[in-house]
Amino acid sequence: MMERPPDVLVSVDLGTTYTGVAWMTPKTPIQVINDWPGSGDRGERKVPTRLVYNSDGSLSSWGFMCSDDDSIDDPASGKTRREFFKIFIDEETLAAAQHQGLSSAPRDTSEARGFLTDYLRNIYHHSKESIETQLGKRHAAGGWRDMAVTFLFSVPTTWTNMGIINVFKGIVKDAGFGTEGPQHAAFVDLTEAEAASVATLKTSAISFDVGDLFLTVDAGGGTTDLALMRITSTHAAFPQMAQVAAVRGIGIGSSLIDRAFVRLVSRRLAENPDAQSRLPADLAVAMARNHHFKTVKHKFGEKVYMQQTFKIHMEGVAYDFSHVGLGVESGRMLFTKEEIQELFDAQIDGIMSRIKEQLDWMKDNNMPDQVGYMILAGGLGSSAYVRDTIQQKLVDYKHPNAQHVVVIPCQEPQLVVVRGLLLDQQQRMDSGNKSVLATRIARASYGVVAKELYNPAFHFDEDVRPDQFDPKKKWAMNQIQWLIRKGDVIDPSLPLSKKFEIQLDAGDMTRHWDAEIVISQNDPSYLPRSMKQAGAIKLCSVKSNLTGVQQQQMVLKKKRRSWFRRGTSFYQLQFDIRVIVAPADLRFELWFDGYRFSGNHEPIAVTWD
């Protein structure tokens, strides 16, 4: 990624409800930041993805400090709590939330981007301070700015649109990541499902064999991501795996359990209006946020913790308050085991539906393989009830591709993504760029708009232009040459290349050209051949700048004269644009005469649509 090996690698797992940050150096193992402001002495390893704003729009608090923000629950204060803003930079998700009447949803994606930038800016400043302190560099001359620091971010598998990922990269930059020093850089690296799979292969106690299949289910706060992987190498230091199917995501997570709990409490309150005057405003929301409910949610399913009735403390309610209709005894609201189960079951059913789709895909593609292990990660994935219920459902389901599958929680499931990001990058640096994820499956088709030699059988009703130097040639314009087709196996160590041949007059000094990159979600057998056909949209423009290339470096072409036309000479400039397809990113390189072109300027400029 960078010419100079990084002094520090920092990974960030920006979650819908909680965010984790970890780091490492060539001499130190993975360190997880656990000194978040406002967390006290609890050593919390993830910080709430939460903000509180003052009435004038200025930021009042973030993370754990939001819980202690004075007068946040007093409407007269004018303060506003903001949560779940990560998912709302996606227009479709925001529109769905607004349609459902979610009161905390931002007005538009621009406001959501502002919330996310404010939050990540605080994550950056605290992470910088914490790492500097640990390295003894906080007050040293140069310090952080002079270090080579690489930041690695994951993205949800549900973000399939490059537009959203590019917006996210802009937010990361605006928040300060990769900008403070000349050797600082920030990358959107793996999807959350892929990072979880990397950590599984690198740290799991399971003894994998080459050819084994496992399915990672990363169930977090707002999304659940699935990745089906096959072991391709069990090398002790540099194990590798390959994607069997494109990673998938679904909008299911532990935050939906919180919302279901709010609805449950709200129904009780609505059915007992006589009690509301004695209760605090927004009681249902407050109960969903307090640590008493979170304890029930995290421990539900553990045998020693299970009971028929769960009593959840109601903050702001006197201990001598009881109400039969509300199910309240001594300031605590009572819930049956079945009521708590229902909160989980709707989410488990959604996860199982996606698991069955993945298994059915194997069956439909005549794959005889057995999925031996299903690895649960993420906050929701750490639940004993979720694990045991999914295991039982798989036993009862008896799918032909998962006859003896074992459901296993990964080590520290809530930190699996930050660990996976670091472990993959560490292996790449130590092994000469051998990623843990050896190959992946393309989730979309990518092509370049080009001209093709005109053929009337193929180019009916297309825009046609004569060749500038050869009157016998015609070119069909705006044709699409597909570099990657949806479902293709992609080796990240082998970039894809598109050769360009530009014809120039002897005195023509033009040295920069634009290429349009397009994307399609169509089935590979139904890809459009030109921009006149439906199914492809422009993704970006790539400007190649070959300033500095001299005429003697080009190929001289001569056309013989005929009895009616003078002979002509022109130069042909040949170069390649290489496309590097990362799991959640697309990068480009300009190559000329067999070498990566640099010159004294930026050779490639990408403008995203």
Image (cartoon, rainbow, N blue to C red):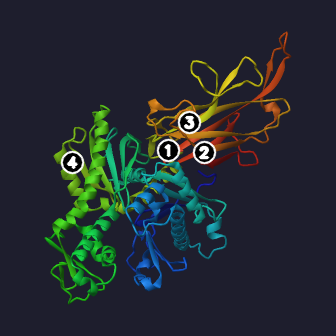
Image x and y of residue 445, in percent: 50, 38
From the viewer's perspective, tell me whether residue 523 is left or right of residue 285: right
Mark 2 / mark 4, whichever is N-terminal: 4
Image x and y of residue 285, in percent: 33, 74
Task: Report helix, strand or loop for mark 1.
Answer: loop
Image x and y of residue 399, in percent: 22, 41
- Asked if one can make out residue 27 in the rendered structure from this viewpoint, the answer is no
Mark 4 / mark 3, whichever is N-terminal: 4
Residue that mark 4 sits on: 394
- Alpha carbon of mark 1 to alpha carbon of mark 3: how far? 26 Å
Rendered position, 306 above or below 213: below
Label 2 vs label 1, nearer the camera: 2
Residue that mark 2 sits on: 540
Residue that mark 3 sits on: 447
Q: In percent of the image, x 19 and y 70: which residue is there? A: 305
From the viewer's perspective, tell me whether residue 392 is left or right of residue 512: left
Residues at circles 2 and 4 in contact by the CB criterion of under 8 Å: no
